[in-house]
Structure formats: C-alpha cells, structure tokens
Image: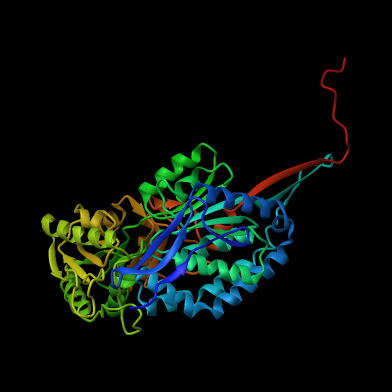
Amino acid sequence: MDSIARYEHLYIGGAWVAPEDGGLMESVDPSVGRPWAVVAYGGKRDVDKAVAAARAALDGPWGRMPGHERAALIRRFADLYKEHARALAVLETRDSGRALRESLADISGHSNAYHWWASLADKNAGRTIPFDDSVHAFTSRVPVGVVGAITPWNVPLMAALWKLGPALAAGCTVVLKPAEHTPVTSLELAKLFDEAGFPPGVLNVVPGYGKDGAGEHLVAHPGIDKIAFTGEGTTAKSILRAGAETMKRFTFELGGKSPHILFADADLEQALNAATNSAWTLCGQSCALGSRVLVQRPVYDRVVEAFVERAGRVRVGLPLDEATHMGPQAHEEQLAKTLSYIDIGRNEGAELVTGGRRLTGPDHAAGYFVEPTVFANVSNDMRIAREEIFGPVASLIPFDDEDEAVALANDTAYGLTAGLWTGDVGRAHRVSSRIRAGMVWVNTYRFIRWSTPYGGFKASGWGRENGIEALDSYLETRTTVISTTGRFPDAYAR
C-alpha cells in the first residue's frame, strides 16, 4: 500500500502554518476508495488570518507595485508552473480520479494562460473624458480588493487558474478555498507562488468545508470584497444571501445541461467524435459537456448505434494509467448521484441502450467507476434531460427541423454552452444566434481558451471567466474630476 502523503499546514501570509481552529482531513483516491493524503483544513480563525494577510498585501507592497512588476512575478510563476506541470497533473489525478491523459493535456497548457494574464497586468488603463476647459475628467481602473476564490472538485487547477489569472493581473489579492474533496493541488500551487517570490499575503490557501466551515465564513466575511465561485446553483444562492449583507461583488460559474445538436447534413463522423467525447470526458463531470444530444431524425438510428459502439471502446480504469480513457467518479457521493439518475432514466421510460452499471472488476475494485451510459428515445421533459447529472450519461433526443432543435436547446433552466454540427453555413449562423447560451460551438466542441470569454446565461451563472471580460470583473472604475480653475460659485451670494 502506498504511503500517505501529508499536507498538514495552511498557506497564509507567505508562511506555512498549522490550523488554529481547523484540523486534518483525508483526501480519498476515488480509484481505490481509500485515503491517499492527509490535508490541513481551516476554520473561522484561519480564514480571519488569511483575509487579514490578503488585506495587508493589498494595502502594502503588492498594492503599490507597478503593473509591469506584477507581470514579471506572474511570468516567473508561469514558468515554474510549466516545469511542474506533469507532477501537478499526477496529483490532480490522484485527488480527483480524472484520467491522467486528460489532466496532462489540460494542465500542460495552463502556463500559457498565466503568461497571457501577465501580459494584461500593466494595461488596466482608464480614459480621459472630454468636457470643457473648466475641468479635467478621467477614469482609472483599480483592483476590486480582496477576492475569495472558491473552486470545485472536478478541475481544481483549471478553476484556480480562471480566478487567479485575472485577479492577479488586476492587482487583487486572494484567499483560495479549494473543495474539501480535492485540496492537494491548491497547496502545491502555493509552493510555486512562494518560490516565484510574491509578497506575503497575495495568495493564501485555506482548504476547508463549505457549510459551517471555512467556505461559509469566507463568503460572509466583511474583509472580502468579491467572491468568485465555481460550483452548483443551490450553493451559489446561499453564497449570494450570505455575501449580500456586505455588498460583495460576485462571479458565478454554475451548472449546465448543454445541447449538442447534430443535423443530418453534418459531417457525421466528426460530429460523433465530438459528441461521444463530450459525453464522457472528465468522466462526465463537467458543466460544459454536451449531455443532451439532439439528433435530427434521418440520422438518429445511426447516431444511437454509433454511441453504443463507441461506448464499448472507452477504456475505464485506473486513472494513472495513460492508456485509460475514463477514470472514476470523483467521490462516493457523486457515484451515488450518478447511479440514482440512471435509475431515474429507466423509471421515466427512457431506453437504456448501453452502460448503466457500477464497475467492480479486477481493475476497478472498490473505486467509484461507472460505465459510459447512453439513453435513447429521451424526451426533453424527463429529469435526465433537464437536471445536471455530472456523470458519464448521455441522453439522445430526436428532432425534426431547425425550429424544433432551437426550441429543445433553449428549453432548459441552464445556458452555459451549446454545440451544433451542420454543413450549411447559413444554418450555422441562424441557429447559433438563436441559442441562449454563453458559448456556442459550431462544427467543434469544448474549444475553451484563456482569451475566449466563458460563462453562462440564465441559471448557469453571472459574469465571465477568461477573456478581457473576466479582467473587468476584478476591477472597479474610479472617476476623477479636477477643476482647472479652482473656482466654485457661491450659490448663496446676494
């Protein structure tokens, strides 16, 4: 049995400190169902210390640092990140169960994103506002302040990047609270920040629990100016209520039930490549996956057949094996949720054409593995078509024409992403412009980069991550008006 890794300190104010009112928790390797690491978690006093350290850095050296010097530190961190990318990918796989081939493909590109954010750190310029000769009016862009960044368990390093990149480029300081299921890589991230030479308090990492723990205290804390949260909508509503008392700023990247539309005139082979990948990548644990596959009737039977055949080719196994396509569900609760939705689909009358079982063979043992699962003849009013499962479950829904496809695509509480495949360029423009989603892909899927804004309509969130739009959400606009004459009339002169 492997030895247990130990991460017994929090990172606060540039120092590794034992929790004051937290303790130690276990991180479970979901591929074997047993702990692989022991990790410190923080309580209320630890959050207080972290917020104070972040405020001191904001009011101190980091807040006074010119943008080009901040950029240099971010670049140094990006280079260290690149050197350690493989080790970080292995740790994320141990923590979350994500297949190593996916972790490597994702995390190896993160350094480029941090370099891109560094390039914006000295470009937060305002503008001059013409008026008349009596005043000089201008705006300046200033950091929103201390940011509480709360990241999910499915892609902890990517979610941290999407918050830290714009926050640091804007000149903010950060208290990062990773999900209790996957805390390890955030502490490794802190080691690289320390090595890069950031002033103490710019980044503070306090793993912990949400309700009645570090997360709940962080979102209500009067010293936090903004919350950047990725996760589930019910939690976001609780965060909003807790943070409203102190008028915090918020960005929420929440759930999705994305439509993936396959028209009969599409290059079907390419469409199937994308549709099957987006059903099962990340073990189905991504809010951007096209789990509602809308298929035009002339090709519907062919698509169902292809999904079944390709599901049989997915190698489900130990995630550290680079031959593995799909690892386990990230934790036991998610395993139970996924299996419960498979039962719901059966009971609703959808046709289970492949998968649907927990895997318990020699390569799966006590891990949280689920077969790639496909339901056919799904109607859009079924729960498996309306609710986010977050597991490797695809629902295939037939449609007749363009109008019906758009109506089905938009008939959801969510509006994060969508995709469509067609050989008709006119249809590509017509349909993409009618879909209520924050990102629409045409003849591709899951193309997400640091420069492309990402975020949702409707229940899928507030604001954007990535792109210039993300930087804007970490900045406030100050308007300054200076009199050029120094005169102000006496309104009460006789």
Q: Is residue 412 left or right of residue 353?
A: right
Q: Please indicate, yes or no, whether residue 421 appears anywhere in the rendered image.
A: no
Name the quarter where the C terminus is drawn: top right
Q: Nearer the viewer, residue 215 or 381?
A: 215
The residue at the point 17 percent across, 65 percent down is 375
Q: Coloured how?
A: rainbow
Give the percent coordinates (x, y) of residue 292: 26, 62
Locate residue 382 relative to residue 271 in the image: left or right. Answer: left
Please state if 390 lies on the left or on the right of 147 as rendered.
left
Dividing the image into 4 quarters, which one contains the N terminus? Answer: bottom left
Image vertical order of residue 279 relative to residue 242, above or below: below
Q: Is residue 259 visible?
A: yes
The residue lying toward the viewer, choosing from 398 and 88, is 88
The image quarter in which residue 420 lies: bottom left
Estimate the x, y position of residue 295 in percent, counting from the top left.
23, 67
Q: Quadrant of residue 180?
A: bottom left
Give the tally of numbered discs: 0
Q: Where is residue 109 in the image (x, y as percent from the top left)?
A: 50, 76
Single out the residue that lies furthest toward the top: 494
From this view, report whether residue 328 is shown above or below residue 458.
below
In the displayed structure, does residue 181 sit left or right of residue 123? left
Viewer-side residue, 471 vs 325: 325
Question: Looking at the image, which is closer to me, 123 or 63?
Answer: 63
Which residue lies at the image location 16% right of the left edge and 76% below the top edge? 305
The location of residue 358, given as percent across then percent down, is 19, 69
Against 163, residue 84 (above or below) is: below
